Image (cartoon, rainbow, N blue to C red):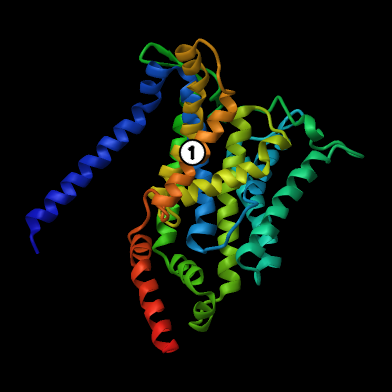
Amino acid sequence: MNWQRVKSDRRAALVAFVALGLLLAAAPFLVGAGLGNGWVRILDFTLLYVMLALGLNIVVGYAGLLDLGYVAFYAVGAYLYALLASPQFGLHLPVWLILPLGALVAGLFGMTLGAPTLRLRGDYLAIVTLGFGEIIRIFLNNLDAPVNITNGPQGINLIDPIALGGVSLSQSFSLFGMQVPGIYAYYYLFLALALLIVFISLRLQDSRIGRAWVAIREDEVAAEAMGINTRNVKLLAFAMGASFGGISGGLFAGFQGFVSPESFNLMESVMILCMVVLGGMGHIPGVILGAILLTVLPEALRYIGPLEQALFGRVVVDPADLRMLIFGLALIVVMIFRPAGLWPSKTRRREFDSEPSVLEHEQEALYDASR
């Protein structure tokens, strides 16, 4: 073994990690100085979607369970924070108590969804989870009579902002004599929690449970024949993924200060699923890349209207329609030319690269049998 090369690779990896850490630490200041604080807020939402995508990656990417109702757990976490930290019930519990509680409650909802769907696969599982997500949204929308709990479609406002050590993150703070907006503090909190979820996902991926999830994804019958308790392992996948969604929902409620059922519609679930599939299912860096692209790209395309105005002197096409058209075309092109995702794992890349040869072999076998 060439130890000099190993040391060089380790040194290069260390330099890359240090550079990435410095970039992440300076990102809000660089973005705020160049594009304005509005884009720092987009960075905050990007980190929220990274956490959501990593949670769904456990269910879809690791265990291979198609979940179209993942936004329901996001809603559970958000509304739990809203009810326990707002004037709605007169409770103002601290965030360090609400977030773990939100993860626990969302995990229980995940097990509630997973228990009756253990025998379902593919499209049937997708339809059931889709219905579950819509049931939660409609339930929250109608839970204002006869006893008003969620304010129905009006939502819950005046939610307490996230506070750590008695200091509200919504207030600006002083750093080296410079006033820094509170959205910068939210960025660092979200970044810390996103890194924690990445660490947990990495540990799960290399654990016995992670290998059991992959075995179920590849062939559930074979996994069960090898002694894997597929029932418990699949329930654990639903619970773990849902708990990450519950944490993200609580952070969203504290960050926004307002929640309503419209924030948790089907398109949110589809968008989070697209982040996982587009980036590369089961590959954590790929999922993070997909979440970043699908959060930033639609916002960047909002500049289409001003660009049309500058080029043609008027708006030729409705910017909203054109923005979604370009966004959809970009997704189609990526899925045609990169079916495994923009950054797939090595295993998944080998599977897709070997597909043509496997198909040719099967066709030759069929031809020989017909002769």
- Asked where in the image residue 171 lies, by quadrant, the reply is top right
- The 10 Å Cα crowd at callout 1, few under 14, some 14 to 19, many 20 or more, is many
Q: Mark yes or no: residue 9 visible.
A: yes
| Residue shown at 76% from the left, 28% from the top | 87
Quadrant of image for the N terminus: bottom left
Left/right placement of residue 44 relative to residue 71 reads: left
The answer to which of 181 and 352 lies nearer the viewer is: 352
In the rendered image, the residue lying farthest to the front is 371
- Asked where in the image residue 109 lies, by quadrant, the reply is bottom right
Tag 1 residue: 294
| Residue shown at 52% from the left, 24% from the top | 302
Left/right placement of residue 264 relative to residue 307 reads: right
Residue 105: % across, % down: 67, 51
Quadrant of image for the C terminus: bottom left
Residue 247: % across, % down: 58, 44
Q: Mark yes or no: residue 89 visible.
A: no
Determine whether 365 is above or below 350 in the image.
Answer: below
